[in-house]
Image: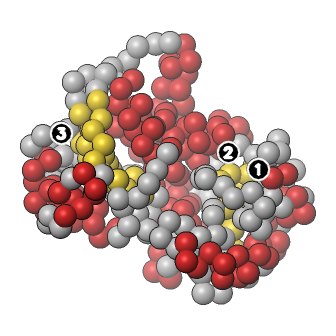
Amino acid sequence: MTIRHFLTLQDLTSEEFQQLIDRATELKTWQKEGRIFEPLKNKVLGMIFEKSSTRTRVSFEAGMIQFGGNAIFLSPQHSQVGRGEEIADTARVLSGMVDGIMIRTFEHENVEKFAEYSSIPVINGLTDTYHPCQLLADMQAYQEHRGSIKGRTVTYIGDGNNMCHSYINAAMLLDFNLNIASPRGYLPDADIIGKAGDRVKVFASAKEASEGVDLVVTDVWASMGQEEEAQERAKTFAPFQVNSELMALTNKEALFMHCLPAHRGEEVTAEVIDSEQSVVWDEAGNRLHAQKALLEFLMA
């Protein structure tokens, strides 16, 4: 039996991506109805966190419990992961003890190496290069509010980071157009953009990138590990704030998303994140249901 991993969205076909979105919405309905569904009964997910988390940890842990299984939290401070044990060795050991692994770390190469030596499914809970789990929840939220995203135009504003890279992958798989507005020096990886072809357009102006679009997405200006750059980044990214003036340029039915946590008054104003156009709370809540669909897909 071939082991499937989920390290980037490119590990899915377009059909599988859409199936996960649909399944997540179905599982969400079942939970609201109080339906008991335990496809992972007695199975265990190991969760390795080298980066702190709220939504990722709670969604995976709650998802496993609701599916009849369990999850084990592993931090570098309380495991051999933080004392220099080889990634390959950890992968081999944990493969014999749990049924799946979720990793939230810095270098993307670490999850790739872990998957190489793992005989159980490995899930990328976030790396500095990609955040694929968030895109499952984002695309679910858009579909639930506005229907299919195929043929729509999305604008990503801010740092060309892991979220931006995953939006590029999503555009390729779900057939939507992506505008990216980032300051010079903070553009997404050129190779990742290159693979998307004319699906992606890069703008120097956030306003120009937002005219008539269907969804606006942003992220914090300084991610985990970039705290020392926060003051410098605040000056550079100031023209890329998502505010009411910018949202007025979009399609009148446009939505706003943010992967959270958000810094009101920096990358987005309080007026926008708390507006009727914002679906950030549904987006965040969908992390649970999207993750459950993914766990079922990989481990059931």
Question: Mark 3 or mark 2, which is nearer the start of the sequence?
Answer: 3
- Mark 2 and mark 3 in contact? Answer it, CB < 8 Å: no
Q: Nearer the viewer, residue 220 or 167?
A: 220
- Taking the spot 18% from the left edge, 67% from the top edge, the residue there is 84
CA separation, marks 2 and 3?
33 Å
Q: Secondary structure at mark 3?
A: loop
Q: Which quadrant of the view contains residue 76?
A: bottom left
Q: Which residue is tagged 3?
A: 98
Q: Are marks 1 and 2 in contact (CB under 8 Å)?
A: yes
Residue neighbourhood size for the residue with mark 1, other residues' Cα within 10 Å, grouped as few (<14), some (14–19), many (≥20):
many
Considering only order in the chain, which callout, 1 or 3, is on the residue closer to the N terminus? 3
Real-space Cα separation, disc 3 to disc 1, in angstroms: 39 Å
Residue receiving disc 2: 280
Residue 155 appears anywhere in the view: no
Q: Does the image show residue 289?
A: yes
* Left or right of residue 251: residue 85: left
Instruction: Point out the tag, 1 or 2, that comes first from the N-terminus.
Output: 1
Q: Which residue is mark 1?
A: 273
In the rendering, at what x and y percent does residue 142 appear? 65, 44
Using a 10 Å C-alpha cutoff, classify the residue at mark 3 as few (fewer than 14 neighbours), some (14 to 19) or many (20 or more).
Answer: some
At x 63%, y 64%, the residue is 220
Identify which residue is drawn at 21% across, 59% down: 81
Q: Amino acid at mark 2?
A: Val
